[in-house]
Amino acid sequence: MPSPWFDVPYVFCRLRLTVSHAFRKKEAGGGADALVTSHSTDYVVAGTFRLQRMRDSLRPYFSNPKVSLRVAGWSLSGMSSGSGESAFETGTRKDFAGSTTPGPVILEIYPDDKHQANFQTQDDNAFEIKLATHSWERSGAGFNQEARDTEEGHISFLIQQPFPAKPGEVRLQDKPPFVLLNTPFCLAVTACEPPRISGSFRLTPGLPAFRIVDDTVDQNPIPHCRVRVQCPDGVAREFVADDAGEIFIPRSGKDVYTLLEVLEDAAPLCLSRPAGWTIEAMPDQP
């Protein structure tokens, strides 16, 4: 029997991968002059996009060829050894905050394998970022050299987890059966520790016009939040976010809706007090 996922035209995806760890390792048997290797990093990879089902596929297969991921974070890696005039230290710090170049993301569901799904980037040359680097070498004898430059890197991921047989909202597992994240922040490119994963796939008519979240790192959605929006006809109207904090407004590609206020209470629109908020632009529909 064909999977009902074949009848789903689009899935709307929200993804967040968080990596934060540090280690310091001393070479065994080296005594006081043993080589010490250190590494620490803290970064986030996030994205919001829609995937469209591709026809003529043997399995439910969804794709978007032009996804851009948001990346922000840093890493610090170094080595040191010795003491006094024989001491030396080398290190490199990498920083980046911005968006990757566009690239393809796919979701493929295997109905014959308990609806196991592969959610991944494609094309190793896509999702490029340019990191700012600061490198240094120092010695106890007075040598000191520093350099600042840029370094190109790429982001890629593969997440495997089961999907339900019946289409519906799917939450990404915090610890799925398999996850692989490659970034230029870690020493071996691959994340030194598995990322903390959050996000979901939803069956929606399109991308939401607005999403209302709190100001924590996890950006938890604020459900049933009331907002005032200026519509294309110039009239301000009130809308209410759904359970995921998202607001869907039927619109054509040229319609412009402007978020005017996020209302913090349940009073009538004319009496409600505005709440503090910031705006994050939603990506264009593919």
Image: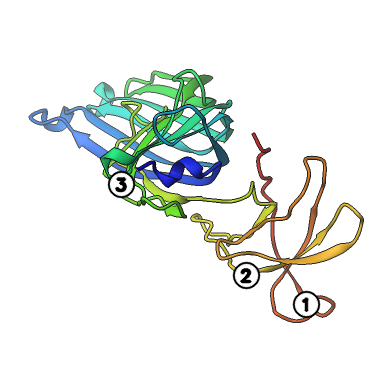
> Any mark on residue 272, and which?
1
Q: Which mark is residue 224?
A: 2
* Front in this rendered view, residue 139 or 179: 179
Q: Position of residue 197 (x, y in %)?
A: 39, 48
**In the rendering, at what x and y percent does residue 141 appear?**
33, 20
Residue contact between numbered discs 1 and 3, judged by CB atoms under 8 Å: no
Identified at 58% across, 67% down, the residue is: 223
Q: How many marks?
A: 3
Residue 176 badge: 3
Which element carries disc 2, helix, strand or loop? loop
| Residue under the point 82% across and 80% down | 271
Given the current orientation, which residue lies at the most extreme right position? 234
Q: Residue at x 65, y 51 (%)?
A: 208
Q: Position of residue 144 (x, y in %)?
A: 42, 20
| Disc 1 from disc 3: Cα separation | 43 Å
Mark 3 or mark 1, which is nearer the start of the sequence?
A: 3
Residue 113 visible in the current orientation: yes
Q: Quadrant of residue 102?
A: top right
Residue 44 showing in the rendered view: no
Identify the residue shown where x is 28% and y is 28%. 80
